[in-house]
Image: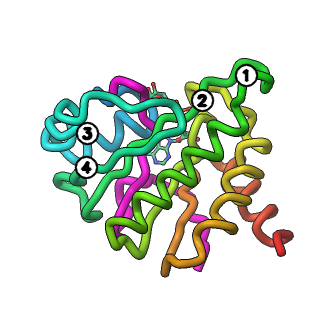
């Protein structure tokens, strides 16, 4: 089932939470900061051991003190106007996160609206990519949730998912 929730992704109690991280994996603002605060220092320790992550790639760690078991860290593209491979890289975030989740036997996971905060990706364009990728690669999962922190993203996902085939 694909669902849309308006709220804080750190409260998710399924198997895995996806984090919109940066290439250092050492934490930051936005959802990344919230996940590290809620999960505690074990996440940062695991991230240090991994050592970094390329744009569009995904890596997995413990979820520390959160209810979920894992955090999948993926690095979205910074929006530079759309002609620097941003759509391809954003699609890779969703695909690589789903592929890693499948390999780990994860059945339920939650995505934030990757790249649409500090990285400046236009929300409607990002939502089209996120929904397309989850609909085409997410069939094997029991639950996939789009966790929208902002009301406009929540409205966008609700509207677009109602009109998706
Ligand atoms: N739960 C769910 N979504 C959230 C939460 C939360 N607790 N907090 C923010 N969001 P952003 P990016 C939403 O900026 O654009 C970090 O510093 C937010 O409203 O977190 O991919 C990293 O370290 C927005 O819709 O991620 C990187 O340096 C969405 O999450 C950089 O930001 C993504 O916004 C990544 O930027």
Q: In the rendered view, does 79 fall on the left or right side of 56?
A: right
Q: Quadrant of residue 109?
A: bottom left
Mark 4 secondary-structure assignment = strand
Q: Position of residue 141 (x, y in %)?
A: 50, 76
Q: Does label 2 or label 1 sit earlier along the sequence? A: 2
| Residue 17 within the magenta-colored segment of the rendering | yes
Q: Circle 1 sits on which residue?
A: 84
Q: Which disc is residue 77 wearing?
A: 2
Residue at the (43%, 28%) spot, across then down: 22
Dot 1: element: loop
**Quarter of the image with the C terminus in it:** bottom right
**Mark 1, other Cα within 10 Å: few <14 / some 14–19 / many ≥20:** few
Please name the residue that numbered disc 4 is placed on.
61
Q: Contact (CB < 8 A) between labels 2 and 1? A: yes
Name which of mark 1 and mark 3 comes first in the sequence.
3
Measure how far apart labels 2 and 1 are at the Cα level: 9 Å
> Residue at horizontal 63%, vertical 40%?
90
User: For the magenta stretch, what is the residue range?
Assistant: 1-24
Numbered mark located on residue 158 in the image = none
Upstream in sequence: badge 3 or badge 2: 3
Distance between mark 1 and mark 3 Cα atoms: 32 Å
Is residue 14 magenta-colored? yes
Disc 3: which residue: 37
x%, y% of residue 70? 28, 58
**Mark 4: few/some/many CA within 10 Å (<14, 14-19, 20+):** some
Could you tell which of marks 2 and 4 lies nearer the N-terminus? 4
């Amino acid at each position: 089932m694909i669902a849309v929730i308006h709220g804080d992704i750190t409260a998710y109690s399924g198997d895995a939470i996806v984090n919109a991280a940066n290439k250092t994996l050492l934490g930051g603002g936005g959802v990344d900061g919230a996940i590290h605060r809620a999960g505690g220092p074990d996440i940062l320790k695991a991230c240090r051991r991994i050592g970094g992550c390329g744009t569009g790639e995904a890596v997995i760690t413990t979820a520390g003190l959160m209810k979920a078991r894992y955090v999948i860290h993926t690095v979205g593209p910074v929006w530079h106007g759309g002609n620097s491979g941003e759509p391809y890289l954003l699609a890779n975030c969703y695909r690589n996160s789903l592929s890693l989740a499948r390999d780990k036997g994860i059945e339920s996971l939650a995505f934030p609206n990757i790249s649409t905060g500090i990285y400046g990706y236009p929300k409607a364009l990002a939502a089209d990519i996120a929904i397309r990728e989850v609909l085409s690669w997410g069939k094997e999962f029991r639950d996939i949730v789009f966790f929208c922190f902002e009301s406009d993203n929540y409205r966008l996902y609700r509207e677009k998912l109602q009109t998706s085939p």
